[in-house]
Image: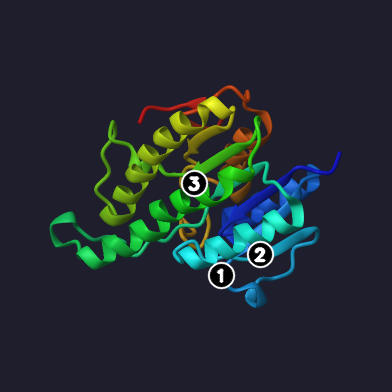
Amino acid sequence: MSAAVVLVTGASRGLGREVARRLVDEGFTVLAGVRDPAGMKPLPGVEVLCLDVADPASITAAATTVQERFGRLDVLVNNAAILLDDRSDVLSLDGDLLQRTLETNCLGPLRLAQAFAPMMARGARIVNVSSGGGQLSVPSTWSPAYCISKTALNALTVQLAEALKPRGIAVNAVCPGWVRTDMGGPEAPRSLQQGADSILWLVLKANPGLTGGFWRDGAQIPW
């Protein structure tokens, strides 16, 4: 049987790149979804797929390519995200900035799930990389557009989990924690490896029957 096929979005750097690298080591056929393939530093064993998650036409083209080349997708890791409003305040939040953030951080994963679910079989998994900033149980006030988008992504996770449960496809959200990446910054307490571990647990170790949850380090956390 050929290797399982996984698509990791936002894989040119940071968590996405680390997850893609480690899935190659696990024997997966790894597709790295990136906006600018020419600008991505080569990653051995990873096939680069041109993909802009904020562009519906790009998503459609990527899904067509995967269908034609592999005929299936076993794992979708929705990792691509943007953070545009560092240290802003919800009362001064620009609506256009919020819309741009939602387009990438929530509508992108929705459109990807819609495009790729038809080629996913029982046992497939969708992992939405979220954030503690999206929790309603522990409200966050930093970067409100980003936090709101992750709350929306969590809600989307629940909806997708219910929609795909009859087909045996697991959909979960994961908080990798505050990680030392370009987005997280050098003061973040968690290493790239620790953040990737949280994501990879859902890909590699979680019971395939687990769906519709929010996870960090292999343990469920409240919405």
Which quadrant is home to the N terminus? top right
- Residue 35's mark? 1
Q: Which residue is mark 2?
A: 49
Question: From this viewpoint, which residue is outermost toward the right?
Answer: 1
Q: Amino acid at mark 1?
A: Arg
Estimate the x, y position of residue 116 in percent, counting from the top left. 58, 49
Estimate the x, y position of residue 201 in percent, counting from the top left. 62, 34
Is 155 in front, or is 181?
Answer: 155
Q: Earlier in the sequence, mark 1 or mark 2?
A: 1
**Disc 3/disc 2 C-alpha distance (Å):** 31 Å
Res 96 quadrant in image = bottom left
Point 64% across, 37% down: residue: 203
Mark 3 or mark 2, whichever is nearer to me: 2
Which quadrant is home to the C terminus? top left
Residue 55 in sight from this viewpoint: yes
Q: Which residue is mark 3?
A: 189
**Disc 3/disc 1 C-alpha distance (Å):** 28 Å
Q: Earlier in the sequence, mark 3 or mark 1?
A: 1
- Residue 219's mark? none
Q: Is residue 222 above or below residue 78?
A: above
Q: Amino acid at mark 3?
A: Pro
